[in-house]
Image (cartoon, grey):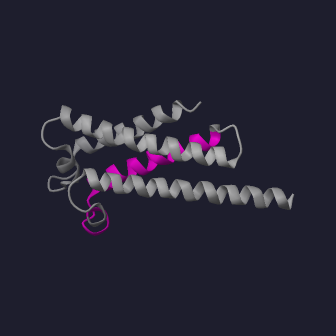
Amino acid sequence: MLADLARDGGAALAYSTVGIALIALGFVLVDVITPGNLRQQIWVDRNPNAALLAASNVLGVGIIVAIAIWTSDGGIGRALAASVVYGLIGLAVMAVAFVLLDLLTPGKLGELLVDDSTGRNPAVWVSAALHIAVALVVAAGLS
């Protein structure tokens, strides 16, 4: 029983470490594809548009990692590898979807999403939904 608890606790710690690393990478990716400093815009300027965009990315990555762990049919090594691989695929697909959405909409999407001078921009809701939808599609591919 104690051996199982130690093994399961170690697995949870390993999964959490991978998940946090992928979420951090996702945050950096959103920061790169949007103008300005995302941390500044969220925590100092309190920009709700930037916060919603980052939050949807965090949630999307979390969905992918959780489903990768849940559907893994092997040991912890296989589950961790699946989490990393599918998490990176999810981040790449989310970035590509963002770029495609930018090409299909007027103006520069990144600039619209971080501009809070006119209040909440409806485009941020579309972009946030896109992040979650892409994450769900990637996660569905795991089953």
In-image side of 5 versus 35 (left or right): right
Q: Where is residue 132 in the image (x, y as percent from the top left)?
A: 41, 39
Q: Residue at x 18, y 48 (%)?
A: 112
Q: Is residue 66 visible?
A: no
Please say whether residue 57 is one of the residues in the magenta stretch.
Answer: yes
Q: Quadrant of the C terminus?
A: top right
Residue at coordinates 48% horizontally, 45% vertically from top-left?
87
User: Which quarter of the figure is the N terminus placed in?
Assistant: bottom right
Q: Compared to 97, does 54 lie above or below?
A: below
Quarter of image, res 134: top left
- Say which quarter of the image contains residue 126: top left
**Per the image, is 81 magenta?**
no
Residue at 50%, 48% in the rendered image: 62
Q: Percent position (x, y) of residue 33?
A: 26, 50
Q: Is residue 9 left or right of residue 1?
A: left
- Percent across and percent down for residue 135 are 45, 38
Does residue 122 appear in this view? yes
Q: What stretch is highlighted in magenta?
A: 41-70
Main SS, magenta region, reads: helix
Residue at (32, 52) in percent of width and height: 30
Q: Is residue 8 left or right of residue 123?
A: right
Considering every residue shown, the one lying at the far right of the view is: 1
In depth, the one of 138 and 115 nearer the eye is 138
Residue furthest left in the image:
107
